[in-house]
Image: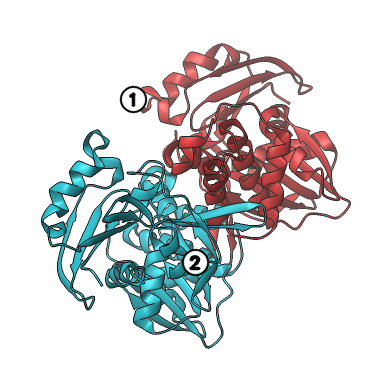
Chain colours: A red, B cyan
Amino acid sequence: MPHLIAVDWGTSSLRGARLDRAGRVLEEKSAPLGILNVPNGDFAGVFNSLFSDWMKPAGSVCLISGMAGSRQGWVEAPYVACPAGPEELERHLHWIEPRIALVPGLSVEQGEVPDVMRGEEVQIFGAMRLAGVTEGLFVLPGTHSKWATVREGRVTGFRTYMTGEFYGLLGQHSILARTLDADAPLDEAMFLRGVTRAGEGKSLLHNAFGVRALALFDRLSPAQSASYLSGLLIGEELRTQELPAGGDVIVIGAPALTGRYALALAGTDTTVRTFGAEATWAGLRALQG
Amino acid sequence: MPHLIAVDWGTSSLRGARLDRAGRVLEEKSAPLGILNVPNGDFAGVFNSLFSDWMKPAGSVCLISGMAGSRQGWVEAPYVACPAGPEELERHLHWIEPRIALVPGLSVEQGEVPDVMRGEEVQIFGAMRLAGVTEGLFVLPGTHSKWATVREGRVTGFRTYMTGEFYGLLGQHSILARTLDADAPLDEAMFLRGVTRAGEGKSLLHNAFGVRALALFDRLSPAQSASYLSGLLIGEELRTQELPAGGDVIVIGAPALTGRYALALAGTDTTVRTFGAEATWAGLRALQG
């Protein structure tokens, strides 16, 4: 098996890792050169400036996941339809040079409305390997959170939630911004109060206004408002999930985010396991066959 | 009964009407001088420049509803707690000059979270008079839509929904803005498709991303996306209402908005009745005793 250069090229940033033949990470690097920040759209130039050294050894191969394979990226790698596992992705790797391939994202049709992911599928397959499972519910929090169901090693369905984007819009641009400190550290009790409130089934359109009303009556400080709003949004995600009773929920992402999901899920009959960047490297390696 | 000068002084604009002793509108005027646009906070100056002529006749009285009575307004008129009807409001009119009073808003406590309205209560009482009813479900669409329940002539409870604000945030500042024409005329079929989708009970956080996914696969044009998103949001409001089977839903507001609610409610077992600005004048007159 050749040396793998694993790259996660997203919208706002890019991360890469050089793995040895056993899959161990030898070196990592990152840059704020997401696909929206590539000068003159010169993807090859950015790639070479960062990774040409790593590509020198004969037999080195690079797999790139994430938005680099989107229409706005380096080259478009068409989505692969669910159900799909590492085998399907490997078969549809989009080779743009003899040793560089883009990993396609996944698409799914659910009730007349499609859904898509790019990059998260690799993290899911990596976490599957790291956790030693081939079934389960996977959560990838972020600007556009993904909840994915895996059966027999393949993603059978998933849904995207605009949770992080709603948090930014509401906390920075809505009427709530006037009485909310988005930079405050997490207040766990207030966060959980928001999760509970969301679980009561009222609409998010109404619950969000509650942040304003509570602040108006001095019952939420600006710091508390941020945690409460975060709880409302993550709780709204949880509200519509079918959680596996007594089963695992695997949460993949940065610790600051996965910690919030672990907190929100602590009151449910599930076991939460979390993974970080290592899931990406393990997932890209899984595509090497 | 003295001549009434009826004023609805909101966040972004101000409207006034001069009524005769029988309550007929003799003259109306409006200005883009909402409470956030009052130069140097000189509310008295703005008031006099617009209404001093109307106030000249002896016995003229002015009642002002809306955000002018908020903390950021002319003088704060504390909220009156629900249940409350015209009698309660009249008793708590906040006289700031011998012939000028601010109408207080309403507050309510529901499950640990308060809610508030300012101005809509007057429209509700006006519509009650115009419709000849003392019970029912009232809807006031807008930036912050209100759904209120009236029993025996008093508002017993209500909920605010940030529907209009979410529409603006999503249509102008989110990822959806890239493929959405917010100025397009309403596409009724797409609007109703959004209403139906919302009624299926998935989270708004997910349904909103569906607008993006449908556009990505060229299944929604920018004009259609705007109508579909509007349907998703208004449908999300409807999803959590207890509609009165066989009963009336009274919708108060500008025709462009009330028409959308009438459309969304057409498939339900309710009769929709709509009122416009006349509800405000009738409501302020109802506070004259």
Instruction: Say what secondary structure mark 1 lies in.
Output: helix
Instruction: Say what secondary structure mark 2 lies in.
Output: strand
Residue positioned 78% across, 40% down in the render: A128
Residue B243: give x, y in percent of width and height.
55, 77
Chain of the residue displaying label 2: B
Q: What is the three-letter code of the residue carrying label 2?
A: Trp
Which residue is tagged 2?
A: B147
Label 1 CA crowd tier, 10 Å (few <14, some 14–19, many 20+): few
Left/right of residue B120 with respect to residue B152 in the rendered view: left
Which of A181 and A169 lies nearest the eye of the viewer? A181
Residue B2: give x, y in percent of width and height.
23, 69
Residue positioned 40% across, 77% down in the render: B128
Relative to A89, is B107 above or below? below
Which of A138 and A21 lies nearest the eye of the viewer? A138
Q: What is the three-letter code of the residue carrying label 1?
A: Asn
Q: Quadrant of the C terminus of chain A?
A: top right
Which of A129 and B144 lies nearest the eye of the viewer? B144
Residue positioned 47% across, 14% down in the render: A49
Residue A252: give x, y in percent of width and height.
71, 36
Residue positioned 51% across, 52% down in the render: B209
Label 2 CA crowd tier, 10 Å (few <14, some 14–19, many 20+): many
Give the number of the mark in front: 2 or 1: 2
Q: Give the residue at the far right of this rendering.
A: A246
Q: Give the residue at the far bottom of this rendering.
A: B246
In which quadrant of the rendered view does residue B7 lie?
Answer: bottom left
Chain of the residue displaying label 1: A
Which residue is tagged 1?
A: A40
Relative to A130, is A199 above or below? below
Q: Give the residue at the far top of this rendering.
A: A53
- Whether residue B277 is visible to the viewer of this picture, yes or no, is yes
**Residue B286 badge:** none
